[in-house]
């Protein structure tokens, strides 16, 4: 299957700082990327959907000014957690798909664990 | 709105035995996709099996098979000859059109040696 990478795999930051997480599709072009948040022992919660070259569409309740998403190319999307606070600590997962393909499948990155002190 | 329900928060099975994980969903669409994903302790999401709703034949991938009951909106996953490496969280998911994946709450599967 297609490969999606995330960087970093884990990050610890101080409260009030900003953190950027990268999501890359390594062997395919991702027309659409998704960002999820997962709390321990819970399911994935979709935060936003981003299409290459367009503004991201945020799910209800997700602060767009806090979670900045950029999808400037067909292989890279970034999630920036601005002015992070301890309650932002979580596991963040991205996924990607190519809408031009007939295969209706999302390919997931390995996730990034964010800890805000 | 489409919803996916997994009514079994936890399941356990003896190694080499068979276990079935349940999933029901709600939709008014007729053409959609259903998936089972596995999330092991590494937390990497792994696609286990997929089913297109227009196909009547149940999907099978080696030891994994599904029982897709479209009228009942049921999509259970059967794991045969369970192995220790099957221990993980399993998520049922629904997908329609160019929309987002809708996940169930997950079922934690434990394999007893």
Image (cartoon, helix red, strand yellow):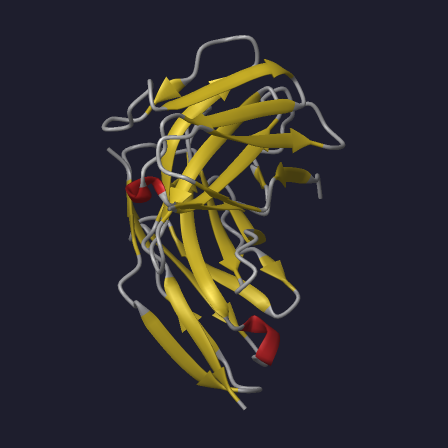
Please identify the quarter of the rendering in which residue B84 is found.
Answer: bottom right
Q: Quadrant of residue A58?
A: top left
A108 or A110: which is nearer to us?
A110
Percent x, y of residue A8: 60, 41
Quadrant where the N terminus of chain A is found in the figure: top right
Q: Residue at x 28, y 37 (%)?
A: B2
Q: Residue at x 49, y 27 (%)?
A: A79
Q: Is residue B80 above or below residue B107?
A: below
> Is residue A114 shown above or below B99?
below
Q: Is residue B83 left or right of residue A93?
A: right
Which residue does the image show at 49% across and 9% down from the upper left? A54
Q: Nearer the viewer, residue B15 or A60?
A: A60
Residue in view at x 58 percent, y 53 percent: B46
**Total numbered circles:** 0
Q: Is residue A9 left or right of residue B37?
A: right
Q: Is residue A26 visible?
A: yes
Image spot of residue A24 (x, y percent): 65, 30
* Relative to B16, B71 lies left or right: left
The reply to whether residue B83 is in sight is no
Examine the image and state in which quarter residue A107 appears: top right
Q: Nearer the viewer, residue B110 or B22?
A: B110
- Give the side of residue B7 with respect to residue B101, left or right: left
Seen as rendered, the residue at the extreme bottom is B113
Instruction: Point out residue B110 in the picture as x, y percentages from the top left corner.
Output: 45, 78
Percent x, y of residue B61? 63, 61
Most distant residue in the right direction? A27
């Amino acid at each position: 299957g297609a490969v999606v990478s995330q960087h970093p795999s884990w990050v610890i930051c101080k409260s009030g700082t900003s953190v950027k997480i990268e999501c890359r599709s390594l062997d395919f072009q991702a027309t659409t990327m998704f960002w999820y948040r997962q709390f321990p022992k819970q399911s994935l919660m979709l935060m936003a959907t981003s299409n290459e070259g367009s503004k991201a569409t945020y799910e209800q309740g997700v602060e767009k000014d806090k979670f900045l998403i950029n999808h400037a190319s067909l292989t890279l999307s970034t999630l920036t957690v601005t002015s992070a606070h301890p309650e932002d600590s979580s596991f963040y997962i991205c996924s990607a798909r190519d809408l031009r393909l007939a295969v209706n499948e999302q390919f997931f990155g390995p996730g990034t664990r964010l800890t805000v002190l | 709105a489409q919803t996916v329900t997994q009514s079994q928060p936890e399941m356990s099975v003896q190694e080499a035995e068979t276990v079935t994980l349940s999933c029901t969903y709600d939709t008014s669409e007729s053409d959609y996709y259903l998936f089972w994903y596995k999330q092991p302790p590494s937390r990497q999401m792994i696609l286990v099996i997929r089913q297109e709703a227009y196909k009547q034949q149940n999907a099978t991938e080696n030891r994994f098979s599904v029982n897709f009951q479209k009228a009942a909106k049921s999509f259970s996953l059967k794991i045969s000859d369970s192995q220790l490496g099957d221990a993980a969280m399993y998520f049922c998911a629904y997908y329609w059109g160019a929309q987002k994946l809708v996940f169930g709450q997950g079922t934690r599967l434990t394999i007893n040696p």
